[in-house]
Amino acid sequence: MVMKENNETKKEIILKAGIFERNADKGDSSGYLIGSRCKLCGRIQFPPKKICAGCCKDDSLESVRLSQKGEIYSYTIIRQAPPGFVAPYATLYVDLPEKVRIFAPSFLNDWGEEPIEIGKEVELVIGEIKEDEKGNEIIGYKFRPIGKK
Amino acid sequence: MRKVCIIGVGMTRFGKFIETGIEDLGRDACWAAIKDAQIDPKDIQVGFCSHSNGGRVAGQRILKEVGIAGVEILNIENACSGGSSAFRVGYCSVAGGFYDLAIVVGVDKMYGSGGLIPPNLEDLDGMVGRTLPGRYAMAIRRHMYEYGTTVEQLAKVSVKNHKYGVLNPYAQYQKEVTIEEVLNSRMVADPLTLLQCCPAGDGSAALILCSDDLKKKYSNKKPIYVGASVVKSGKYFTADTDITGMEFVSRAAKEAYDIFGGGPEDINVCELHDAFTAAEIMHYENLGFCKKGEGGRLIDEKRTEIGGMISVNTSGGLLSRGHPLGATGVAQIVEIVCQLRGEAGRRQVANAKVGLTETTGGAIPEIGNGACSVNIFYS
Protein backbone atom coordinates (compact mmCIF):
# COMPACT_ATOMS: atom_id res chain seq x y z
CA MET A 1 0.00 0.00 0.00
CA VAL A 2 1.14 3.52 -0.74
CA MET A 3 0.52 6.67 1.25
CA LYS A 4 -1.63 9.25 -0.51
CA GLU A 5 -0.87 12.94 -0.25
CA ASN A 6 -3.19 13.53 2.68
CA ASN A 7 -1.66 10.61 4.62
CA GLU A 8 -4.55 8.23 3.99
CA THR A 9 -3.37 4.85 2.76
CA LYS A 10 -4.40 3.77 -0.72
CA LYS A 11 -6.71 0.82 -0.71
CA GLU A 12 -7.07 -2.01 -3.16
CA ILE A 13 -10.60 -2.28 -4.47
CA ILE A 14 -11.84 -5.24 -6.51
CA LEU A 15 -13.20 -4.06 -9.88
CA LYS A 16 -16.33 -6.24 -9.71
CA ALA A 17 -17.19 -9.14 -7.44
CA GLY A 18 -17.67 -12.66 -8.71
CA ILE A 19 -15.86 -12.46 -12.03
CA PHE A 20 -12.33 -13.48 -11.10
CA GLU A 21 -10.29 -15.27 -8.42
CA ARG A 22 -6.95 -13.98 -7.20
CA ASN A 23 -4.24 -16.33 -5.95
CA ALA A 24 -2.42 -13.78 -3.79
CA ASP A 25 -3.97 -11.03 -1.67
CA LYS A 26 -1.88 -8.15 -3.03
CA GLY A 27 0.12 -7.12 -6.08
CA ASP A 28 0.04 -8.85 -9.46
CA SER A 29 -0.64 -12.56 -9.26
CA SER A 30 -2.02 -15.51 -11.15
CA GLY A 31 -5.70 -16.29 -10.88
CA TYR A 32 -8.75 -17.28 -12.88
CA LEU A 33 -11.54 -15.56 -14.75
CA ILE A 34 -14.89 -17.03 -13.69
CA GLY A 35 -17.47 -17.75 -16.34
CA SER A 36 -20.73 -19.64 -16.40
CA ARG A 37 -21.18 -22.90 -18.25
CA CYS A 38 -24.56 -24.29 -19.26
CA LYS A 39 -24.98 -27.94 -18.30
CA LEU A 40 -27.56 -28.39 -21.05
CA CYS A 41 -26.05 -26.77 -24.14
CA GLY A 42 -22.42 -26.36 -23.08
CA ARG A 43 -22.28 -22.64 -23.81
CA ILE A 44 -19.66 -20.78 -21.78
CA GLN A 45 -20.11 -17.07 -21.09
CA PHE A 46 -18.01 -14.38 -19.45
CA PRO A 47 -18.85 -12.64 -17.22
CA PRO A 48 -21.02 -15.22 -15.41
CA LYS A 49 -24.74 -15.05 -16.13
CA LYS A 50 -28.05 -16.02 -14.55
CA ILE A 51 -29.71 -17.09 -17.81
CA CYS A 52 -28.07 -19.07 -20.60
CA ALA A 53 -27.93 -16.99 -23.76
CA GLY A 54 -27.99 -20.15 -25.84
CA CYS A 55 -30.89 -22.17 -24.51
CA CYS A 56 -32.50 -19.51 -22.28
CA LYS A 57 -32.72 -21.71 -19.21
CA ASP A 58 -32.21 -20.18 -15.77
CA ASP A 59 -31.42 -23.32 -13.78
CA SER A 60 -28.67 -24.94 -15.85
CA LEU A 61 -25.69 -22.66 -15.28
CA GLU A 62 -22.64 -23.54 -13.17
CA SER A 63 -19.54 -21.48 -12.37
CA VAL A 64 -16.42 -22.46 -14.23
CA ARG A 65 -12.81 -21.31 -14.17
CA LEU A 66 -11.67 -20.18 -17.63
CA SER A 67 -8.32 -21.03 -19.21
CA GLN A 68 -5.46 -18.87 -18.03
CA LYS A 69 -3.80 -18.61 -21.42
CA GLY A 70 -5.08 -17.50 -24.80
CA GLU A 71 -4.10 -16.06 -28.15
CA ILE A 72 -4.27 -12.40 -29.23
CA TYR A 73 -7.02 -11.96 -31.84
CA SER A 74 -6.47 -8.22 -32.12
CA TYR A 75 -5.09 -5.26 -30.17
CA THR A 76 -4.52 -1.54 -30.12
CA ILE A 77 -2.40 0.88 -28.11
CA ILE A 78 -4.61 3.48 -26.42
CA ARG A 79 -3.00 6.93 -26.53
CA GLN A 80 -5.96 8.95 -25.22
CA ALA A 81 -6.92 7.28 -21.95
CA PRO A 82 -10.28 7.27 -20.19
CA PRO A 83 -10.42 8.36 -16.51
CA GLY A 84 -8.24 6.30 -14.18
CA PHE A 85 -6.08 4.81 -16.91
CA VAL A 86 -2.67 6.11 -17.92
CA ALA A 87 -1.78 6.15 -21.62
CA PRO A 88 -0.18 4.49 -23.41
CA TYR A 89 -1.53 1.06 -22.64
CA ALA A 90 -2.79 -1.76 -24.85
CA THR A 91 -6.20 -3.36 -25.09
CA LEU A 92 -6.50 -6.91 -26.40
CA TYR A 93 -9.09 -9.36 -27.58
CA VAL A 94 -7.81 -12.69 -26.25
CA ASP A 95 -9.32 -15.92 -27.58
CA LEU A 96 -9.40 -18.70 -24.99
CA PRO A 97 -9.38 -22.38 -26.02
CA GLU A 98 -13.00 -22.74 -24.87
CA LYS A 99 -14.00 -20.28 -27.63
CA VAL A 100 -14.63 -17.36 -25.32
CA ARG A 101 -13.20 -13.98 -26.42
CA ILE A 102 -12.03 -11.75 -23.57
CA PHE A 103 -11.51 -7.99 -23.83
CA ALA A 104 -8.80 -6.88 -21.41
CA PRO A 105 -6.00 -4.37 -20.95
CA SER A 106 -2.31 -5.21 -21.23
CA PHE A 107 0.36 -2.91 -19.87
CA LEU A 108 3.41 -1.95 -21.87
CA ASN A 109 5.88 -2.51 -18.96
CA ASP A 110 5.02 -6.20 -19.26
CA TRP A 111 6.01 -6.24 -22.94
CA GLY A 112 9.24 -4.24 -22.77
CA GLU A 113 10.90 -4.35 -26.20
CA GLU A 114 8.75 -7.23 -27.43
CA PRO A 115 6.09 -6.11 -29.95
CA ILE A 116 2.43 -6.97 -29.41
CA GLU A 117 1.27 -9.10 -32.35
CA ILE A 118 -1.86 -10.93 -33.44
CA GLY A 119 -1.45 -14.63 -32.71
CA LYS A 120 0.89 -14.29 -29.72
CA GLU A 121 0.06 -16.29 -26.59
CA VAL A 122 -0.65 -14.33 -23.44
CA GLU A 123 -1.41 -15.26 -19.85
CA LEU A 124 -3.90 -13.90 -17.35
CA VAL A 125 -2.74 -11.68 -14.48
CA ILE A 126 -4.91 -10.38 -11.65
CA GLY A 127 -3.69 -7.04 -10.35
CA GLU A 128 -4.01 -3.28 -10.53
CA ILE A 129 -5.44 -1.94 -13.79
CA LYS A 130 -6.34 1.66 -12.90
CA GLU A 131 -6.95 4.12 -10.08
CA ASP A 132 -10.23 5.60 -8.95
CA GLU A 133 -10.72 9.33 -8.35
CA LYS A 134 -9.44 8.96 -4.78
CA GLY A 135 -6.21 7.26 -5.87
CA ASN A 136 -7.22 3.78 -4.72
CA GLU A 137 -5.90 0.88 -6.82
CA ILE A 138 -8.57 -0.95 -8.74
CA ILE A 139 -7.81 -4.67 -9.01
CA GLY A 140 -8.95 -6.31 -12.22
CA TYR A 141 -7.81 -8.68 -14.94
CA LYS A 142 -5.16 -8.11 -17.58
CA PHE A 143 -2.85 -10.16 -19.81
CA ARG A 144 0.89 -10.25 -20.39
CA PRO A 145 3.21 -12.23 -22.65
CA ILE A 146 3.96 -15.77 -21.40
CA GLY A 147 6.98 -16.15 -19.18
CA LYS A 148 7.45 -12.51 -18.22
CA LYS A 149 7.53 -11.74 -14.50
CA MET B 1 -48.43 -1.22 -45.09
CA ARG B 2 -48.60 2.18 -46.75
CA LYS B 3 -45.94 3.83 -48.86
CA VAL B 4 -44.26 6.64 -46.90
CA CYS B 5 -42.54 9.70 -48.27
CA ILE B 6 -40.40 12.47 -46.89
CA ILE B 7 -41.80 15.89 -47.79
CA GLY B 8 -39.61 18.12 -45.65
CA VAL B 9 -36.06 18.21 -44.31
CA GLY B 10 -34.10 20.64 -42.17
CA MET B 11 -31.03 20.87 -40.00
CA THR B 12 -28.80 23.24 -38.11
CA ARG B 13 -25.14 23.55 -38.82
CA PHE B 14 -23.24 21.09 -36.60
CA GLY B 15 -20.48 22.52 -34.44
CA LYS B 16 -19.60 24.05 -31.11
CA PHE B 17 -22.53 26.08 -29.77
CA ILE B 18 -21.85 26.69 -26.10
CA GLU B 19 -24.69 29.21 -25.72
CA THR B 20 -27.34 27.24 -27.60
CA GLY B 21 -29.33 24.57 -25.80
CA ILE B 22 -31.08 21.42 -27.01
CA GLU B 23 -34.46 23.13 -27.30
CA ASP B 24 -33.18 25.93 -29.53
CA LEU B 25 -31.17 23.56 -31.74
CA GLY B 26 -34.16 21.24 -32.09
CA ARG B 27 -36.52 24.14 -32.76
CA ASP B 28 -34.34 25.47 -35.56
CA ALA B 29 -34.10 22.07 -37.28
CA CYS B 30 -37.84 21.39 -36.90
CA TRP B 31 -38.78 24.84 -38.17
CA ALA B 32 -36.52 24.41 -41.20
CA ALA B 33 -38.19 21.06 -42.01
CA ILE B 34 -41.69 22.50 -41.50
CA LYS B 35 -40.91 25.43 -43.81
CA ASP B 36 -39.32 23.10 -46.36
CA ALA B 37 -42.44 20.95 -46.37
CA GLN B 38 -44.65 24.07 -46.55
CA ILE B 39 -47.01 22.62 -43.93
CA ASP B 40 -48.86 24.05 -40.97
CA PRO B 41 -47.25 22.61 -37.81
CA LYS B 42 -50.75 22.19 -36.38
CA ASP B 43 -51.33 19.43 -38.97
CA ILE B 44 -48.57 17.25 -37.51
CA GLN B 45 -50.15 14.32 -35.73
CA VAL B 46 -47.17 12.70 -33.97
CA GLY B 47 -43.56 13.49 -33.10
CA PHE B 48 -40.46 11.34 -32.51
CA CYS B 49 -37.28 12.69 -30.98
CA SER B 50 -33.89 11.11 -30.51
CA HIS B 51 -31.13 12.30 -28.23
CA SER B 52 -28.65 10.74 -25.81
CA ASN B 53 -28.11 13.40 -23.16
CA GLY B 54 -30.80 16.04 -23.60
CA GLY B 55 -32.66 15.26 -20.41
CA ARG B 56 -36.19 13.99 -19.97
CA VAL B 57 -38.99 14.57 -22.49
CA ALA B 58 -36.65 16.40 -24.86
CA GLY B 59 -39.01 15.90 -27.82
CA GLN B 60 -41.88 17.64 -26.06
CA ARG B 61 -39.61 20.50 -24.96
CA ILE B 62 -38.47 21.00 -28.55
CA LEU B 63 -41.81 20.61 -30.33
CA LYS B 64 -43.61 23.10 -28.09
CA GLU B 65 -41.20 25.69 -29.49
CA VAL B 66 -42.70 25.25 -32.97
CA GLY B 67 -46.34 25.23 -31.96
CA ILE B 68 -46.76 21.45 -31.53
CA ALA B 69 -48.32 20.24 -28.28
CA GLY B 70 -51.03 17.82 -27.23
CA VAL B 71 -50.18 15.08 -29.77
CA GLU B 72 -48.36 11.82 -29.13
CA ILE B 73 -44.64 12.50 -28.74
CA LEU B 74 -42.08 9.77 -28.05
CA ASN B 75 -38.36 9.94 -27.23
CA ILE B 76 -35.94 7.34 -28.56
CA GLU B 77 -32.38 6.57 -27.44
CA ASN B 78 -30.16 4.15 -29.38
CA ALA B 79 -26.67 5.64 -29.05
CA CYS B 80 -25.21 6.64 -32.43
CA SER B 81 -28.19 5.06 -34.20
CA GLY B 82 -30.68 7.11 -32.20
CA GLY B 83 -31.70 9.41 -35.03
CA SER B 84 -32.11 6.50 -37.43
CA SER B 85 -34.16 4.68 -34.80
CA ALA B 86 -36.44 7.69 -34.32
CA PHE B 87 -36.92 7.70 -38.09
CA ARG B 88 -37.66 3.95 -37.95
CA VAL B 89 -40.40 4.42 -35.38
CA GLY B 90 -41.77 7.43 -37.28
CA TYR B 91 -41.78 5.43 -40.49
CA CYS B 92 -43.64 2.54 -38.84
CA SER B 93 -46.26 4.91 -37.40
CA VAL B 94 -47.14 6.16 -40.89
CA ALA B 95 -46.56 2.92 -42.85
CA GLY B 96 -48.66 1.02 -40.35
CA GLY B 97 -51.56 3.41 -40.79
CA PHE B 98 -51.51 4.93 -37.30
CA TYR B 99 -50.79 8.47 -38.52
CA ASP B 100 -50.62 10.40 -41.80
CA LEU B 101 -48.15 13.20 -40.97
CA ALA B 102 -45.21 12.85 -38.59
CA ILE B 103 -42.20 14.90 -37.54
CA VAL B 104 -38.87 13.26 -36.62
CA VAL B 105 -36.14 15.27 -34.90
CA GLY B 106 -32.69 14.21 -33.71
CA VAL B 107 -30.55 16.40 -31.48
CA ASP B 108 -27.58 16.26 -29.14
CA LYS B 109 -24.91 18.42 -27.53
CA MET B 110 -21.62 16.53 -27.38
CA TYR B 111 -19.27 19.51 -27.24
CA GLY B 112 -17.32 19.64 -24.03
CA SER B 113 -17.45 15.88 -23.49
CA GLY B 114 -13.64 15.81 -23.76
CA GLY B 115 -13.73 13.77 -26.92
CA LEU B 116 -14.20 10.27 -25.52
CA ILE B 117 -17.81 9.20 -25.00
CA PRO B 118 -17.81 7.56 -21.56
CA PRO B 119 -19.08 3.97 -21.40
CA ASN B 120 -22.23 3.03 -19.49
CA LEU B 121 -21.48 2.54 -15.80
CA GLU B 122 -21.95 -1.25 -15.88
CA ASP B 123 -20.06 -1.79 -19.13
CA LEU B 124 -17.35 -4.29 -18.14
CA ASP B 125 -15.22 -3.67 -21.24
CA GLY B 126 -15.39 0.06 -20.49
CA MET B 127 -14.40 -0.60 -16.88
CA VAL B 128 -11.23 -2.42 -18.03
CA GLY B 129 -10.11 0.28 -20.45
CA ARG B 130 -12.01 0.06 -23.71
CA THR B 131 -12.52 3.31 -25.65
CA LEU B 132 -14.62 3.67 -28.81
CA PRO B 133 -11.67 4.71 -31.01
CA GLY B 134 -9.85 1.71 -29.50
CA ARG B 135 -12.65 -0.62 -30.48
CA TYR B 136 -12.56 0.47 -34.12
CA ALA B 137 -8.76 0.43 -34.01
CA MET B 138 -8.82 -3.21 -32.95
CA ALA B 139 -11.22 -4.09 -35.75
CA ILE B 140 -9.15 -2.36 -38.43
CA ARG B 141 -5.94 -3.87 -37.00
CA ARG B 142 -7.42 -7.30 -37.69
CA HIS B 143 -8.56 -6.11 -41.13
CA MET B 144 -5.01 -4.93 -41.89
CA TYR B 145 -3.69 -8.30 -40.71
CA GLU B 146 -6.13 -10.32 -42.85
CA TYR B 147 -6.34 -8.15 -45.99
CA GLY B 148 -3.33 -5.85 -46.05
CA THR B 149 -5.36 -2.64 -45.65
CA THR B 150 -2.96 0.29 -45.19
CA VAL B 151 -2.92 3.46 -43.11
CA GLU B 152 -2.77 5.48 -46.34
CA GLN B 153 -6.09 3.97 -47.40
CA LEU B 154 -7.58 4.96 -44.04
CA ALA B 155 -6.23 8.49 -44.44
CA LYS B 156 -7.81 8.79 -47.90
CA VAL B 157 -11.25 8.36 -46.31
CA SER B 158 -10.59 11.38 -44.11
CA VAL B 159 -9.24 13.40 -47.05
CA LYS B 160 -12.34 12.58 -49.14
CA ASN B 161 -14.85 13.38 -46.42
CA HIS B 162 -13.15 16.62 -45.38
CA LYS B 163 -13.12 17.68 -49.05
CA TYR B 164 -16.89 17.23 -49.16
CA GLY B 165 -17.37 18.97 -45.83
CA VAL B 166 -16.06 22.12 -47.52
CA LEU B 167 -19.02 21.90 -49.92
CA ASN B 168 -21.60 21.45 -47.14
CA PRO B 169 -22.68 24.65 -45.34
CA TYR B 170 -23.97 22.53 -42.44
CA ALA B 171 -20.72 20.66 -41.81
CA GLN B 172 -18.87 21.23 -38.53
CA TYR B 173 -15.52 21.23 -40.30
CA GLN B 174 -15.20 22.92 -43.68
CA LYS B 175 -11.47 22.56 -44.28
CA GLU B 176 -9.58 20.19 -46.51
CA VAL B 177 -6.84 17.99 -45.12
CA THR B 178 -3.98 16.09 -46.80
CA ILE B 179 -2.95 12.45 -46.29
CA GLU B 180 0.17 13.68 -44.45
CA GLU B 181 -1.83 15.91 -42.13
CA VAL B 182 -4.17 13.03 -41.33
CA LEU B 183 -1.36 10.55 -40.59
CA ASN B 184 0.66 13.09 -38.60
CA SER B 185 -2.22 14.22 -36.40
CA ARG B 186 -2.15 13.04 -32.77
CA MET B 187 -2.48 9.24 -32.37
CA VAL B 188 -5.64 8.34 -30.44
CA ALA B 189 -5.60 4.50 -30.65
CA ASP B 190 -3.15 2.82 -33.02
CA PRO B 191 -3.56 3.17 -36.00
CA LEU B 192 -6.31 5.82 -35.69
CA THR B 193 -5.10 9.43 -35.49
CA LEU B 194 -7.19 12.43 -34.46
CA LEU B 195 -8.17 13.40 -38.02
CA GLN B 196 -9.47 9.85 -38.49
CA CYS B 197 -11.99 10.28 -35.67
CA CYS B 198 -15.25 12.19 -35.88
CA PRO B 199 -15.38 15.38 -33.79
CA ALA B 200 -17.57 16.07 -30.76
CA GLY B 201 -20.19 18.69 -31.57
CA ASP B 202 -23.76 19.87 -31.23
CA GLY B 203 -26.58 19.96 -33.73
CA SER B 204 -30.03 18.92 -34.82
CA ALA B 205 -31.80 17.61 -37.92
CA ALA B 206 -35.48 16.98 -38.67
CA LEU B 207 -37.79 15.32 -41.21
CA ILE B 208 -41.47 15.50 -42.11
CA LEU B 209 -42.93 12.10 -43.06
CA CYS B 210 -46.20 11.70 -44.89
CA SER B 211 -48.35 8.88 -46.19
CA ASP B 212 -47.93 8.76 -49.97
CA ASP B 213 -51.65 8.87 -50.75
CA LEU B 214 -52.04 12.09 -48.77
CA LYS B 215 -48.88 13.94 -49.77
CA LYS B 216 -50.60 16.29 -52.20
CA LYS B 217 -52.81 17.57 -49.39
CA TYR B 218 -49.70 18.90 -47.67
CA SER B 219 -46.97 19.68 -50.18
CA ASN B 220 -46.13 19.86 -53.85
CA LYS B 221 -42.42 19.27 -53.30
CA LYS B 222 -40.87 16.29 -55.04
CA PRO B 223 -41.53 13.46 -52.58
CA ILE B 224 -38.76 11.04 -51.69
CA TYR B 225 -39.98 7.54 -50.88
CA VAL B 226 -38.84 5.12 -48.21
CA GLY B 227 -37.86 1.88 -49.95
CA ALA B 228 -36.76 0.02 -46.83
CA SER B 229 -36.16 0.67 -43.15
CA VAL B 230 -34.36 -1.88 -40.98
CA VAL B 231 -32.84 -1.82 -37.48
CA LYS B 232 -31.01 -4.76 -35.93
CA SER B 233 -28.95 -5.44 -32.81
CA GLY B 234 -25.76 -7.49 -32.74
CA LYS B 235 -25.65 -11.22 -32.03
CA TYR B 236 -23.61 -12.81 -29.23
CA PHE B 237 -19.84 -12.62 -29.73
CA THR B 238 -17.68 -15.73 -29.49
CA ALA B 239 -14.07 -16.41 -30.40
CA ASP B 240 -15.38 -17.28 -33.88
CA THR B 241 -16.82 -13.80 -34.47
CA ASP B 242 -15.17 -11.84 -37.27
CA ILE B 243 -15.00 -8.34 -35.80
CA THR B 244 -14.11 -6.83 -39.18
CA GLY B 245 -17.30 -8.20 -40.64
CA MET B 246 -19.81 -6.45 -38.36
CA GLU B 247 -22.40 -9.07 -39.27
CA PHE B 248 -25.25 -6.89 -37.92
CA VAL B 249 -24.50 -4.34 -40.67
CA SER B 250 -24.45 -6.95 -43.46
CA ARG B 251 -27.58 -8.55 -42.04
CA ALA B 252 -29.47 -5.25 -41.81
CA ALA B 253 -28.31 -4.28 -45.30
CA LYS B 254 -29.35 -7.61 -46.84
CA GLU B 255 -32.80 -7.33 -45.33
CA ALA B 256 -33.09 -3.73 -46.56
CA TYR B 257 -32.04 -4.72 -50.09
CA ASP B 258 -34.56 -7.61 -50.05
CA ILE B 259 -37.40 -5.34 -48.87
CA PHE B 260 -36.47 -2.71 -51.48
CA GLY B 261 -36.24 -5.39 -54.15
CA GLY B 262 -32.72 -4.57 -55.29
CA GLY B 263 -29.09 -4.71 -54.28
CA PRO B 264 -25.97 -2.63 -53.67
CA GLU B 265 -25.61 -2.10 -57.43
CA ASP B 266 -28.78 0.02 -57.35
CA ILE B 267 -27.43 2.53 -54.83
CA ASN B 268 -26.21 5.84 -56.31
CA VAL B 269 -25.49 7.76 -53.14
CA CYS B 270 -24.82 6.62 -49.59
CA GLU B 271 -24.42 8.20 -46.17
CA LEU B 272 -22.67 5.66 -43.95
CA HIS B 273 -21.37 5.69 -40.41
CA ASP B 274 -17.78 6.97 -40.69
CA ALA B 275 -17.33 7.63 -36.97
CA PHE B 276 -13.74 6.58 -37.77
CA THR B 277 -12.03 6.15 -41.15
CA ALA B 278 -11.75 2.45 -40.30
CA ALA B 279 -15.53 2.20 -40.18
CA GLU B 280 -16.00 3.53 -43.71
CA ILE B 281 -13.54 1.01 -45.18
CA MET B 282 -15.29 -1.88 -43.42
CA HIS B 283 -18.79 -0.62 -44.24
CA TYR B 284 -18.00 -0.60 -47.98
CA GLU B 285 -17.71 -4.38 -47.57
CA ASN B 286 -20.55 -4.81 -45.05
CA LEU B 287 -22.96 -2.96 -47.35
CA GLY B 288 -21.93 -5.05 -50.34
CA PHE B 289 -20.26 -2.28 -52.37
CA CYS B 290 -17.24 -4.56 -52.78
CA LYS B 291 -16.03 -7.98 -51.69
CA LYS B 292 -14.67 -8.68 -48.23
CA GLY B 293 -11.18 -7.26 -47.85
CA GLU B 294 -11.42 -4.90 -50.83
CA GLY B 295 -12.57 -1.77 -49.01
CA GLY B 296 -9.08 -0.25 -49.22
CA ARG B 297 -8.91 -0.83 -52.97
CA LEU B 298 -12.24 0.94 -53.43
CA ILE B 299 -10.94 4.15 -51.92
CA ASP B 300 -7.62 3.83 -53.79
CA GLU B 301 -9.55 3.62 -57.06
CA LYS B 302 -11.69 6.65 -56.09
CA ARG B 303 -14.84 4.59 -56.70
CA THR B 304 -16.66 6.19 -53.74
CA GLU B 305 -16.05 9.82 -54.69
CA ILE B 306 -18.77 12.07 -56.10
CA GLY B 307 -19.38 10.75 -59.58
CA GLY B 308 -17.79 7.37 -58.82
CA MET B 309 -19.46 3.96 -58.75
CA ILE B 310 -21.27 5.05 -55.61
CA SER B 311 -20.86 8.46 -53.99
CA VAL B 312 -20.25 7.94 -50.29
CA ASN B 313 -20.65 10.60 -47.60
CA THR B 314 -21.13 13.57 -49.92
CA SER B 315 -22.19 15.53 -46.80
CA GLY B 316 -18.70 15.17 -45.37
CA GLY B 317 -19.84 12.25 -43.23
CA LEU B 318 -19.46 12.05 -39.48
CA LEU B 319 -15.76 12.87 -39.88
CA SER B 320 -16.41 16.34 -41.26
CA ARG B 321 -20.12 17.09 -40.78
CA GLY B 322 -19.80 16.00 -37.12
CA HIS B 323 -21.60 13.55 -34.87
CA PRO B 324 -24.12 14.73 -32.28
CA LEU B 325 -25.40 11.22 -31.58
CA GLY B 326 -29.16 11.71 -31.77
CA ALA B 327 -28.92 13.98 -34.81
CA THR B 328 -26.62 12.01 -37.10
CA GLY B 329 -29.06 9.40 -38.39
CA VAL B 330 -31.55 12.13 -39.29
CA ALA B 331 -28.87 14.33 -40.89
CA GLN B 332 -27.84 11.43 -43.11
CA ILE B 333 -31.42 11.18 -44.37
CA VAL B 334 -31.50 14.96 -44.93
CA GLU B 335 -28.46 14.62 -47.22
CA ILE B 336 -29.91 11.71 -49.17
CA VAL B 337 -33.21 13.56 -49.66
CA CYS B 338 -31.32 16.64 -50.92
CA GLN B 339 -29.35 14.48 -53.33
CA LEU B 340 -32.44 12.68 -54.65
CA ARG B 341 -34.29 16.00 -55.07
CA GLY B 342 -31.35 17.50 -56.97
CA GLU B 343 -30.85 20.16 -54.26
CA ALA B 344 -27.31 19.25 -53.15
CA GLY B 345 -25.62 22.17 -54.90
CA ARG B 346 -21.89 21.70 -55.35
CA ARG B 347 -22.13 18.22 -53.79
CA GLN B 348 -24.76 17.04 -56.27
CA VAL B 349 -24.38 13.53 -57.64
CA ALA B 350 -25.69 13.44 -61.21
CA ASN B 351 -28.83 11.30 -61.71
CA ALA B 352 -29.07 10.26 -58.10
CA LYS B 353 -32.22 8.14 -57.89
CA VAL B 354 -31.59 5.69 -55.04
CA GLY B 355 -29.85 6.41 -51.75
CA LEU B 356 -28.90 4.41 -48.66
CA THR B 357 -28.17 5.46 -45.08
CA GLU B 358 -26.42 3.34 -42.47
CA THR B 359 -25.66 4.02 -38.80
CA THR B 360 -24.05 1.70 -36.26
CA GLY B 361 -24.21 2.55 -32.61
CA GLY B 362 -24.10 1.42 -29.03
CA ALA B 363 -20.89 -0.53 -28.50
CA ILE B 364 -21.52 -2.99 -25.67
CA PRO B 365 -19.79 -6.14 -24.48
CA GLU B 366 -20.94 -9.58 -25.59
CA ILE B 367 -23.05 -8.53 -28.58
CA GLY B 368 -20.83 -5.93 -30.15
CA ASN B 369 -23.32 -3.26 -31.10
CA GLY B 370 -26.73 -2.29 -29.87
CA ALA B 371 -28.23 -0.85 -33.03
CA CYS B 372 -27.54 -0.84 -36.73
CA SER B 373 -29.93 0.94 -39.06
CA VAL B 374 -30.05 0.65 -42.85
CA ASN B 375 -32.59 2.67 -44.86
CA ILE B 376 -33.09 2.90 -48.61
CA PHE B 377 -34.76 5.88 -50.29
CA TYR B 378 -35.75 6.53 -53.90
CA SER B 379 -37.23 9.31 -56.02
Image (cartoon, grey):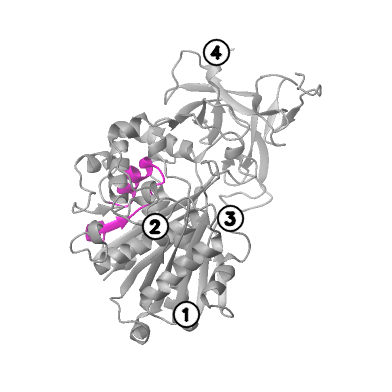
- Amino acid found under the numbered disc labelled 1: Pro
Q: Is mark 2 in CB contact (under 8 Å) with mark 4?
A: no
Left or right: where does residue B337 sit relative to residue A101? left
Q: Residues within 10 Å of mark 2 (few under 14, many from 20)?
A: many
Residue drawn 24% across the image and 49% down it: B304
The span shown in magenta is B263-288
| Front of the two marks 1 and 3 | 1
Residue drawn 42% across the image and 25% down it: A119
Q: Dot 4 falls on which chain?
A: A
Q: Dot 1 falls on which chain?
A: B
Q: CA distance from mark 3 to mark 2?
A: 26 Å
Give residue B41's mark. Answer: 1
Q: CA distance from mark 1 to mark 3?
A: 26 Å
Pointer 4 residue: A147
Say which quarter of the image contains residue B222: bottom left
Give residue B53's mark. Answer: 3
Left or right: where does residue B177 sit relative to residue A62? left
Task: Tell if the residue under mark 2 belongs to the same chain as the one under mark 4.
Answer: no
Give the structural element (helix, strand or loop) at label 1: helix
| Front of the two marks 1 and 2 | 1
Task: Tell if the residue under mark 3 belongs to the same chain as the one under mark 2.
Answer: yes
x%, y% of residue B33?
41, 71
Q: Is mark 3 in CB contact (under 8 Å) with mark 2?
A: no
| Front of the two marks 3 and 2 | 3
x%, y% of residue B273?
39, 51
Residue drawn 39% across the image and 75% down it: B35
Instruction: First in sequence, mark 3 or 2: give its number.
Output: 3
Pointer 2 residue: B252
Between residue B6 and residue A45, name the one nearer to us: B6
Instruction: First in sequence, mark 1 or 2: give its number.
Output: 1
Q: Is residue B63 visible?
A: yes
Q: Is residue B375 visible?
A: no
